[in-house]
Image (cartoon, coloured by chain):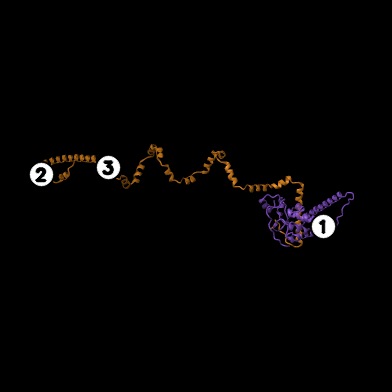
Chain colours: A orange, B purple
Amino acid sequence: MRIPGVDTLSRVPVPPIVQAAFAPVVRRSTTYAVAVGGMLDQLFDQAIAEVVGRVDIDALLDRIDLTEIVLTRVDLDVVVHQVLGGLDEAEIASLVAKVDVNAIAGSLDVDVVLDQMDLTSVVLTRVDLVKVVDAVLEQMDLTTIVLNRVDLVRVVDAVLDQMDLIALANEIIEGVDLPEIIRDSTGSMASETVKGVRMQGIGADQAVDRAVGRLLLRRARTQGPAGS
Amino acid sequence: MDDEAGTDEAHARISPVPREARPFQGQRAGIVTRLIAAVLDSFVIGAVLLGGYLGLVGLVFLVDPRSFQFPDLGLVFSLAAAFGVAVVYLTVFWTLSGRTYGQLVMGLRVLGYGGRRLRFVKALLRAVFVVVLPIGIVWIPFSRNNKSLQDLFLATRVVYDWEPRTAHKDPPVEDEDVS
């Protein structure tokens, strides 16, 4: 241990005789000072140890908001960059390998995660729905499903309820001209003759009308059903 | 086919009328068709008269076969009988079905005001008029609406109607204009 002022004293110009006179005193006092310094060191060490031993660290930490302190006083970006910069890929890989991903996944609240996602838009934008539907349909026997699961009687009843069967039947009969078929199949020569005579009569009527119309310079009568 | 009006009609109900004739249904009939019908009716009336005469002959023969000879009924009686038979025949058929046998064959129907069947009185008047003045039919081609003189005075008309029975709906009322 060094005594303050000793070096200074030694540099002060002192006559040799004085030095000789005080030399024993200086030696003695220096020895004392060194001894006292060592004792004081020990004393301080013991006092600090006693203080540290008596401090309740937990209580102290309880009174301090360490998180707040870290957040306000520590530049976390720098810390993280430093930490990440100090890591190499192998270390990261080994760290990741030690992580129990399943446990983390198990602790996740999936509902909360899903609530924060717009799954519909995700599916619409990211999924090829045509392929998915095709694949699903490929694996399904739709005919069997319909036959087993659908109440066909009700379906047919509902369809028939919405259809005007009479109008449909009339349309079909008109399309195939059923009366004409019946006439052709059952019609006798007489009815064909009557039809021919009637049509010729109508033709003759019109011819007479036209002739008289020309004779009287009359405007031709318009064709069409009665009332036209 | 070529019928627009017939198609519309057939959508409402199935028509037994051939397609080619459908456009003419309800139109006023011309002179040729009506003349043929009248000739056929005259045959019918003649047949009825002949039948009546033969019946009378048979009756006379049964009453006194030994002094049998064909009865001579005289011109006036014959004309009166023909008039009566014709009027009764036309009146009955026009009232009941709107068509005589000749008109049935030719696909015609006599309609009164509003397209309805003739009432008895009008049918009787028309029958008398037709029998008295059969030449009235000649007016048809000169009329814009194919009306004979009888049609003109009695507000009747004769239309093509091939339906076996009267159509369910009443034909439209036409203007009764004079040519």
Q: CA distance from mark 3 to mark 1?
A: 148 Å
Give the foreground label among 3 and 2.
3
- Crowdedness of circle 3 by 10 Å Cα count: few (<14), some, many (20+)? few
Residue A170 image point, x, y percent: 66, 48
Q: Which residue is mark 1?
A: B80
Front in this rendered view, residue A71 or B80? B80
Determine the chain carrying the residue at label 2: A
Q: Which residue is mark 2?
A: A18
Q: Which residue is mark 3?
A: A59
Residue A142 falls left or right of residue B163 = left
Evaluate whether residue A155 shows in this view: yes
Classify mark 3: helix, strand or loop: helix
Residue B164 image point, x, y percent: 72, 50
What's under tag 2, amino acid-wise? Val
Front in this rendered view, residue B54 or B33? B54
Determine the chain carrying the residue at label 1: B
What's under tag 1, amino acid-wise? Ala
Say if labels 2 and 1 share a chain. no
Residue A165 image point, x, y percent: 63, 47
Say if labels 3 and 1 share a chain. no
